[in-house]
């Protein structure tokens, strides 16, 4: 018995030694700030700010708090989910409602648009289900498939392609599904708290990132079903994650009032965005198409925009009086020429 105890203690000591060596190597590599690197090539190009960036459209039609939105692959339509019990598909250019999908449960927390053919949407929430709907099938829209497998609320869902979808949940897991058969392909379960958000790598659909209440962001490989990187640094819940356009970096938004950028190649935090006067949590983040800007929605009704090449201590600009309640979701369309913000004030707003 004593021999086993000694071996356990020796193993623990070895683990701590290896952790110390890893931390030392990561610290040595973290020798420059983002602004040091970016300014070395000369002055940066000026950003397009308000008043050039302004409110272009307001989408009115929901009667309850909007909790989620997601652009279609065509960059013109988007889907929104509200606690009035409806998914609404909008044409963002004309502001017309293309389709309204009544939900069995009004406690919806996430929605997603299939990006290839733009003919399918998904949603989920406190019913613990991911419901899939085919669009363009007339008035009596019913769920084509209900994916059952999570033991907690559904916090986020994203289509990999028309046949596969990934969901994250309050049961601390993510699941990859066959959306045609409804079968579970992989379960990803290294988080120790509710998983709040996920983002699929834009140039490698076998990789995705998840953010959790356990204050970590994890990189997963669907081919092995395992976590390949764990990124720490936040001091509170991570509410939103989004991959950088090149797939080598991702951004996070947290209840600790900061957004951060982590790089997969150096396995480290490469920038942090926050200000002493911003004390509220971040609900959602997304990069611009070029990656120069990071849009972030806040609990204090504001949307701050950060320059990813700056020192992160001052936001680049702020959208002028965006909403009258909490900004719950935002997204940049595929073309990169429009931003949509959704709020508990029941409105969606298009900025360009």
Image: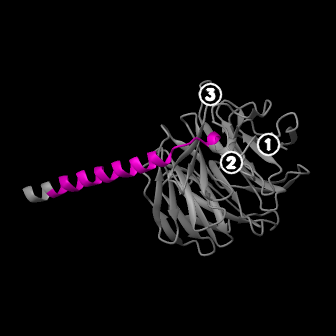
Residue 283 at x, y = what percent? 62, 40
Magenta range is: 7-36
Q: Position of residue 119 (x, y in %)?
A: 77, 67
Question: Image quadrant for the C terminus?
Answer: top right
Nearer the observer, 166 or 10 = 10
Residue 293 magenta: no
What is the C-alpha distance between the residues marked 1 and 2? 21 Å
Local secondary structure at mark 1: loop
Distance from disc 2 to disc 3, alpha carbons, whole Å, reads 18 Å
Tell me which colouring the rendered structure shows.
one colour
Q: Are marks 1 and 2 in contact (CB under 8 Å)?
A: no
Q: Are marks 1 and 3 in contact (CB under 8 Å)?
A: no
In the picture of the structure, the residue carrying the numbered disc 3 is: 278
- Whether tag 2 and tag 3 are in contact, CB under 8 A, the answer is no
Could you give the CA–CA distance between mark 1 and mark 3, rounded to whole angstroms? 26 Å
Provide the residue designation for mark 2: 286
Q: Is residue 34 magenta?
A: yes
Q: Is residue 328 visible?
A: no
Residue identifier under label 1:
45
Out of 85 and 229, give the one closest to the viewer: 229
């Amino acid at each position: 018995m004593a021999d086993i105890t000694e071996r356990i203690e020796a193993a623990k000591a070895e683990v701590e030694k290896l952790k110390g060596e890893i931390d030392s190597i990561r610290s040595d590599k973290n020798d420059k700030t983002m602004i040091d690197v970016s300014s070395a090539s000369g002055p940066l190009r000026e950003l397009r700010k308000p008043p050039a960036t302004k409110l272009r459209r307001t989408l009115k039609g929901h009667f309850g708090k909007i909790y989620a939105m997601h652009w279609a692959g065509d960059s013109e339509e988007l889907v929104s989910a509200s606690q009035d019990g409806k998914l609404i598909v909008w044409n963002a250019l004309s502001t017309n409602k293309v389709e309204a999908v009544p939900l069995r449960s009004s406690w919806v927390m996430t929605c997603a648009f299939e990006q290839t053919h733009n003919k399918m949407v998904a949603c989920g929430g406190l019913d613990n289900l991911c419901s899939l709907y085919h669009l363009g099938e007339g008035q009596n829209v019913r769920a084509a498939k209900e994916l059952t497998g999570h033991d907690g609320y559904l916090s986020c869902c994203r289509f990999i392609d028309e046949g596969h979808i990934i969901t994250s949940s309050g049961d601390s897991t993510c699941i990859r599904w066959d959306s045609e058969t409804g079968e579970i392909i992989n379960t990803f379960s290294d988080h120790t708290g509710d998983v709040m958000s996920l983002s699929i790598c834009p140039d490698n659909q076998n990789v995705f990132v998840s953010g959790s209440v356990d204050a970590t962001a994890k990189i997963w490989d669907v081919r092995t079903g395992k976590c390949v990187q764990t990124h720490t640094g936040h001091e509170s819940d991570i509410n939103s994650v989004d991959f950088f356009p090149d797939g080598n970096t991702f951004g996070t938004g947290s209840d600790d009032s900061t957004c951060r950028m982590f790089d997969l190649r150096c396995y480290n935090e490469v920038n942090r965005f926050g200000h002493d006067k911003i004390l509220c949590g971040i609900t959602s983040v997304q990069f611009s198409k070029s990656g120069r800007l990071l849009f972030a929605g806040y609990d204090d009704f504001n949307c701050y925009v950060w320059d990813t090449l700056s020192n992160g201590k001052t936001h680049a600009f702020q959208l002028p009086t965006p909403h009258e309640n909490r900004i719950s979701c935002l997204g940049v369309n595929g073309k990169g020429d429009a931003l949509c913000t959704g709020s508990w004030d029941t409105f969606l707003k298009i900025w360009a």
